[in-house]
Image: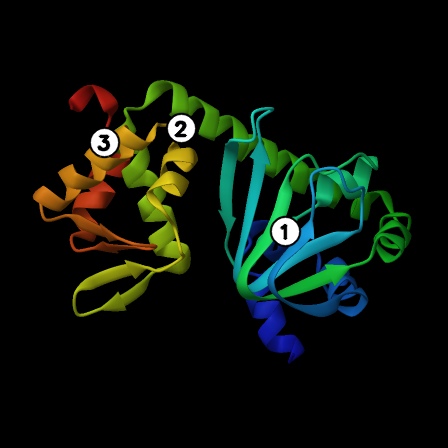
Amino acid sequence: MNKAVLKAVLRRNKWFAGLPSSLADSILRLGRIRNVDNSLIYSASDSRDGLIALVSGQVRLTSFSLSGNPSFLLISSPGSWIGVTSALDGRPYGYDAFAVGRAVLFHVSQERFEALISESNEYYSAFVRMVCDHLRVSMQNRIILRNRRPLHRLAQELQRLAESHGRQTEKGMIIDLRLSQEDLAVMIGVGRQTINRLLKSLEQDGIATAKYASVTIHDLEAIERLSSSDPAES
């Protein structure tokens, strides 16, 4: 892959875009492209294997409860980095990373990663900041789950998916990620009946329609209003 194209994709991530040029160039030099297709990248019990960035395609991050039900689901977008916490502390990942369909990954091996962060405290601190960014997003999501109504949470997730993976058509913005209603339910922390009711509500209002494995947003402005409005307003 052309380095300029790769760098442009990685710079979609605010963390990478804010790196000193010396560190960004070193990461690009040390990493390697991997092509995967409907395969497990790593499991929750696996230990560190360096850093991975998604260049194209879709990677789902999932953890499971003791009963085997998915308790966490996040869809990574191109430019996102995964595996950094395990790369730093050496502990198992704690979640599965699975490529849905064809995906292109950028992989910095554990050996090269450790050599890189040993070069300077500045480099090490940069990756700690990435972990802090991930933690901050995680805390924000927990606050949203606790304080916002399900309809607002669904609208926020659909807006995020549209921005990262949406495809504009005559019918509207299509999010074609092989997402089932159960997947959406897990992503916003509700049950199947609730997600079915919420999607029917959006369809009745002409805002969005859900079909097998895809969602089409017909009124993106309405989704944005629901996503940004205060829960007390509804």
Cα separation between marks 3 and 2: 19 Å
Q: Which residue is mark 3?
A: 229
Identified by mark 2, the residue type is Gly
Q: Quadrant of the C terminus?
A: top left
Disc assigned to residue 189: 2
Q: Which residue is mark 1?
A: 81
Horizontal and vertical percent position of residue 177: 40, 57
- Secondary element at image label 2: loop
For marks 3 and 2 on the same chain, the one whose residue lies earlier in the sequence: 2
Horizontal and vertical percent position of residue 9: 55, 66
Apparent side of residue 82 relative to residue 87 in the rendered image (left or right): left
Horizontal and vertical percent position of residue 44: 69, 38
- Secondary element at image label 1: strand
Identified by mark 1, the residue type is Trp
Disc assigned to residue 182: none
Of tags 1 and 3, the one toward the viewer is 1
Cα separation between marks 1 and 3: 30 Å
- Secondary element at image label 3: loop
- Report crowding for label 2: few under 14, some 14 to 19, many 20 or more residues within 10 A (C-alpha): some
Question: Which residue is at a point 77% across and 42% down the rendered structure image?
Answer: 46
For marks 1 and 3 on the same chain, the one whose residue lies earlier in the sequence: 1
For marks 2 and 1 on the same chain, the one whose residue lies earlier in the sequence: 1
Question: Which residue is at a point 77% across and 36% down the rendered structure image?
Answer: 92
Q: Quadrant of residue 89?
A: top right
Cα separation between marks 2 and 1: 24 Å
Question: Which residue is at a point 59% across and 37% down the rendered structure image?
Answer: 134
Horizontal and vertical percent position of residue 69: 51, 31
